[in-house]
């Protein structure tokens, strides 16, 4: 009987990871014990206790953790991406019609280290020409990783017992940037609206102009596992790729989903974003990743920029095409 390495994996239960979650796909040489849970809990447990051998992890928190020498290494797998124009909310009476109107206002965040906030602040600064130094930031939760942030990030803390959402509804905040849809917006509270009247159209334009489908999460491995079993990284990356390809095949079959016009939306996505918007690997994501590193450095979350080889184990073999996993 061949011995297989047993590892724990914690990730989101997404369509592109589903085949691994249910055991349809197993990495070569590895038996995975897979857990699924919401992102905040998963990230907190990995940051504080390293409870899992392999974990889907916030890209921003990973960079911050690595700057503090956390014993983690990532593979260039990105199971969660999201456009974020839909996640900028404003108080309806705050007089905010354009991104530039956020200057001089109080704007809420979950934390500075949240990847959604990292992307939105960078997008506001570099795409919409907003001076983010002129915004007073207000954070709801304590930062997951202790860092000395840049001097212009001196956020207020939400008072005990209060929330970003409630403050926005009352008008104590002019706007909020949040990784999830705010409860007030979900229930149709007229005090809150999205900054952009047509977020999807704005996101499509942003993609056409920049090429960025923003990366939110990567996959990290405990360094002790990588040091002892370096082959694990390649095996896991291949498995994530195979699971994604199974997802794509299912999406192309209208019998496999309850969406009435699934093929219409599937073709529209391919027309706008290409055949593989969830692409893995270093080179096809280089500009996306280097932009994230630049934003994290500009915003004071890391003391100096990383090289991608400092973050991802694939970089050691990336120049040899036979090792790369692609859809080609």
Image (cartoon, rainbow, N blue to C red):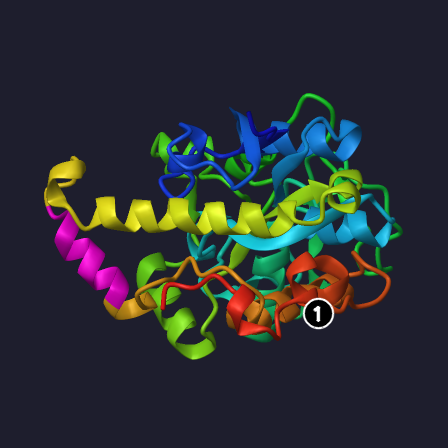
Residue 80 visible: no
The quarter of the picture where residue 67 lies is bottom right
Q: Residue at x 59, y 49 (%)?
A: 218
The quarter of the picture where residue 45 lies is top right
The reply, left or right, for residue 267 in relation to residue 123 is left
Q: Residue furthest front?
A: 1
Stretch of the chain drawn in magenta: 261-270
Q: 165 and 47: which one is in front?
A: 47
Q: 219 and 317: which one is in front?
A: 317
Q: Residue at x 52, y 65 (%)?
A: 324
Spot occupied by residue 312 in the image (x, y as percentages of width and height): 68, 58
Q: Residue at x 26, y 64 (%)?
A: 270
The reply, left or right, for residue 240 in relation to residue 186 is right
- In the picture of the structure, the residue carrying the numbered disc 1 is 294
Q: Residue at x 19, y 55 (%)?
A: 265
Residue 165 visible: yes
Spot occupied by residue 15 in the image (x, y as percentages of width and height): 35, 40
Spot occupied by residue 95 in the image (x, y as percentages of width and height): 48, 57
Secondary structure of the residue carrying tag 1 is helix
Membership of 57 in magenta stretch: no
Q: Residue furthest top?
A: 161
Membership of 264 in magenta stretch: yes
Q: Does 71 sit above or below residue 288?
A: above
Quadrant of image for the C terminus = bottom left
Quadrant of image for the N terminus = top right
């Amino acid at each position: 009987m061949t011995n297989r390495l047993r590892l724990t994996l914690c990730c989101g239960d997404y369509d592109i990871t589903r085949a691994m979650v249910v055991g349809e796909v197993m990495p070569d040489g590895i038996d995975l014990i897979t857990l699924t849970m919401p992102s905040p809990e998963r990230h907190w447990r990995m940051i504080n206790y390293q409870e899992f051998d392999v974990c889907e992890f916030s890209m921003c928190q990973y960079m911050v953790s690595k700057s503090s020498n956390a014993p983690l290494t990532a593979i260039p797998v990105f199971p969660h991406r999201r456009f974020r124009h839909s996640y900028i909310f404003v108080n309806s009476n705050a007089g905010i019609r354009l991104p530039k109107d956020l200057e001089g206002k109080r704007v809420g965040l979950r934390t500075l280290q949240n990847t959604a906030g990292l992307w939105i602040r960078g997008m506001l600064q570099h795409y919409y020409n907003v001076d983010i130094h002129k915004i007073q930031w207000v954070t709801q939760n304590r930062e997951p990783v202790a860092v000395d942030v840049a001097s212009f990030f001196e956020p207020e803390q939400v008072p005990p017992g209060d929330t970003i959402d409630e403050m926005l509804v009352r008008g104590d905040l002019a706007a909020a940037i949040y990784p999830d849809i705010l409860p007030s917006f979900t229930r149709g509270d007229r005090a809150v609206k999205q900054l952009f009247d047509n977020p999807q159209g704005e996101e499509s334009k942003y993609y056409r102009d920049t090429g960025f489908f923003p990366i939110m999460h990567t996959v990290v491995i405990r360094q002790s596992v990588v040091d002892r079993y370096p082959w694990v990284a390649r095996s896991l990356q291949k498995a994530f790729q195979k699971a994604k390809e199974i997802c794509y095949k299912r999406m192309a079959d209208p019998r496999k989903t309850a969406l009435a016009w699934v093929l219409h939306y599937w073709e529209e996505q391919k027309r706008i974003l290409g055949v593989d918007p969830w692409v893995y690997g270093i080179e096809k994501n280089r500009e996306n990743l280097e932009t994230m590193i630049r934003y994290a450095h500009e915003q004071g979350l890391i003391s100096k920029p990383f090289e991608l080889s400092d973050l991802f184990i694939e970089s050691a073999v990336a120049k040899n095409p036979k090792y790369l996993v692609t859809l080609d």
